[in-house]
Image (cartoon, rainbow, N blue to C red):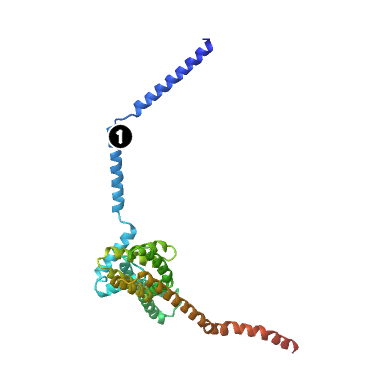
Amino acid sequence: MDLASTEKSFVVVVAAATFVVFWATWLAVTWEPPIEARLRALRTRRMKTRSEQGAAAKPSPKETSLGLMRQIADRLNLLRGSAADQTTRKLRRGGFLSRDASVVYVFIKLALPLALGFLMILLTSSGLLGVPEDMNLVVCIGAVLSGFIMPEVYLKNVTSRRREVLNHVLPEGLDLLTICVEAGLSIDAAFRRVAKEMQSSMPELASEFELTAIELTYLPDRQQALENMAERSDSAAVAALVNALRQTEKYGTPLAASLRILSQEFRQTRASKAEEKGARMPALMTVPLMVFILPTLITVLVAPAIMSAIALT
């Protein structure tokens, strides 16, 4: 072998030996017994669990506010008796199914009159509203009464709108329910399947069907679950559906045929209501035509003649 090849071989051997030495040194520095690694992982997991428990134990601002509202309502005995049950029933008809909905509603109904009255006193006393001094008391009393009435009006409007939406989308929901029943699904499984399919397009009816499916599964009395759906919806169409389901449960009548007939009837009722609204449009448009369009039309037709007569004179 010549001198050049010998030098190359020596360089390769030295480089390999250097790499092995560095690798062995790194292993010696970073190596630790397996038991110590496991103990360190256990300590890390324990600290993480404690931090998560502390974060979970710390109440959120929402929970704190709800707790304060519930405490005030309990101190004033606003969530007891028949009035509280009636309030809960009204909120369920409006689609507010949370257990804290009654607490929030009662607190708003109590605090809103006081807040509006105090705000109106500040505005009238500072002169920002420009109300005469002899009308300050009337305006403040009106604000307080408005605070009492506004939650009731809002809940009534929400309930009415929800009822109309349920009546409008119920035929399509019954069509899907009929398909599921004819495919061999039970009534609770059909409710759950239809609720899943209608979650994005018809959320109101989907929530009703989903809650009914849950109650049909867990309540000991299936008739009670159907009655709860009729009570929550406060709709004649849903009540007719509940009666059909109860008859099917009691007498064993064909469910698919009953659902198909109900769907056709509800669709015809919806079409007749649309035709009724269309027939009322000419009568409703008479007053706007007379007030807004006819004066403008008369002005456009008569203005040239008047201007010509003025010009001749």
Residue drawn at point x = 45 percent, y = 17 percent: 13
Left or right of 33? Residue 6 is right
Residue drawn at point x = 42 percent, y = 68 percent: 175
Q: Nearer the viewer, residue 166 or 259?
A: 259
Q: Secondary structure at mark 1?
A: helix
Give the quadrant of residue 247.
bottom left
The correct choice, above or below, for 170 with respect to 33 in the image is below
The residue labelled by disc 1 is: 37
Give the quadrant of residue 223.
bottom left
Determine the residue located farthest toward the right in the rendered image. Answer: 312
Determine the residue located farthest toward the bottom in the rendered image. Answer: 313
Q: Mark 1 Cα within 10 Å, few/some/many (few <14, many 20+)?
A: few
Q: Quadrant of the C terminus?
A: bottom right
In percent of width and height, residue 106 lies at 31, 70
Asked whether the viewer can see residue 234, the reply is no
The correct choice, above or below, for 33 with respect to 305 in the image is above
In percent of width and height, residue 249 lies at 30, 70
Q: Amino acid at mark 1?
A: Ala
Residue drawn at point x = 31 percent, y = 63 percent: 214
Asked whether the viewer can see residue 72, the reply is yes
In percent of width and height, residue 121 lies at 38, 74
